[in-house]
Amino acid sequence: MAVKFETWPLVLLCTVLAAPEVLAENCRLSVSQPRIDYGAIRREALVAKTSMVLGTRSLRVNVICTEPAAMALRFIGVAADRQGFVFGRQGRFRLSLKHAQVDGRAVEWWAATHLPGEPASGQLLPGQTLVARAAGVPVAGRRLTAQVDIDTELPAGAMEVRDETHLEGQGSFELISPAVPPSR
């Protein structure tokens, strides 16, 4: 992700959050958009606010495997804190996986280190791997599709620039295929 600041208008541009295509064993991972553009804004848009939340942007993650595989995803990027990834010097972005399906069957995302009684979450946190599950059991399949929502926040101080400035947040998705028997 990248953000470009100008003296008058502020141009916000997010670049690749994941490589357009990543291979893992017998599977291929791809994202629908290699670049997200937040457009141009002016500093005046930040009237008396301590931060600016940029609108949610979405992309699709697709995984296609030649043989059934259990599927888990993680995002490799620079952690801003335990809840998100670095965006520029002061901002952060968060990733949420939604509407996931394995072979057309709806699945939930559970942290690989999921504790009993802890609710399932689709939020992709730094250092965390999410496993596709149905009824609490890891699911194996040939095709995974999921929507990735990207929420980006910048503090007001990030808007105080003299010249056009780029802010970036980058990283890549990684497919993890743990050894799990195929679901029935």
Image: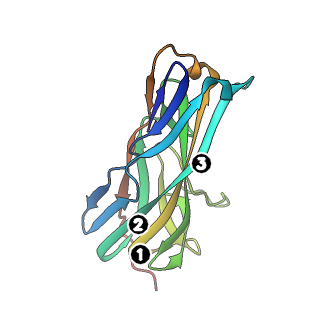
Q: Nearer the viewer, mark 3 or mark 1?
A: 3
Q: Which residue is mark 1?
A: 140
* Residue visible at 48% across and 62% down in the picture: 131
Mark with earlier residue (2, 1): 2
Residue beneath disc 3: 56
Question: Residue at image x 39%, y 74%?
Answer: 143
Give the secondary structure at mark 1.
strand
Secondary structure of the residue carrying numbered label 3: strand
Q: Nearer the viewer, residue 2 or 24?
A: 2
Residue 81 shows in the view: no
Residue 144 lies, in percent from the top left, at 42, 70
Judge left or right: residue 170 versus residue 45.
Answer: left
Q: CA distance from mark 2 to mark 1?
A: 6 Å
- Looking at this rendering, what residue extends furthest in the top direction? 162
Label 1: few (<14), some or many (≥20) within 10 Å?
A: many
Q: Given contact means CB atoms under 8 Å apart, are the residues at marks 2 and 1 in contact?
A: yes
**Regarding mark 2 in the picture, which secondary structure is present there?**
loop
Instruction: Indicate which disc, 3 or 1, sits on the residue closer to the N terminus.
Output: 3
Could you say which is closer to the camera, residue 57 or residue 141? Answer: 57
Most extreme residue toward the right is 48
Looking at numbered disc 3 in the image, what kind of residue is underneath it? Answer: Thr
Q: Nearer the viewer, mark 3 or mark 2?
A: 3
**Within 10 Å of the Cα at label 2, are there few (<14), some (14-19), or many (20+) other Cα atoms?**
many
- Does residue 43 appear left or right of residue 71 in this picture? right
Amino acid, disc 2: Met
| Observer able to see residue 153 | yes
Circle 2 sits on which residue? Answer: 71
Residue located farthest toward the bottom when viewing the structure as drawn: 184
Q: Mark 3, residues whose alpha carbon is within 10 Å: few (<14), some, or many (≥20)?
A: few
Q: CA distance from mark 3 to mark 2?
A: 25 Å
Tag 1: amino acid: Ala
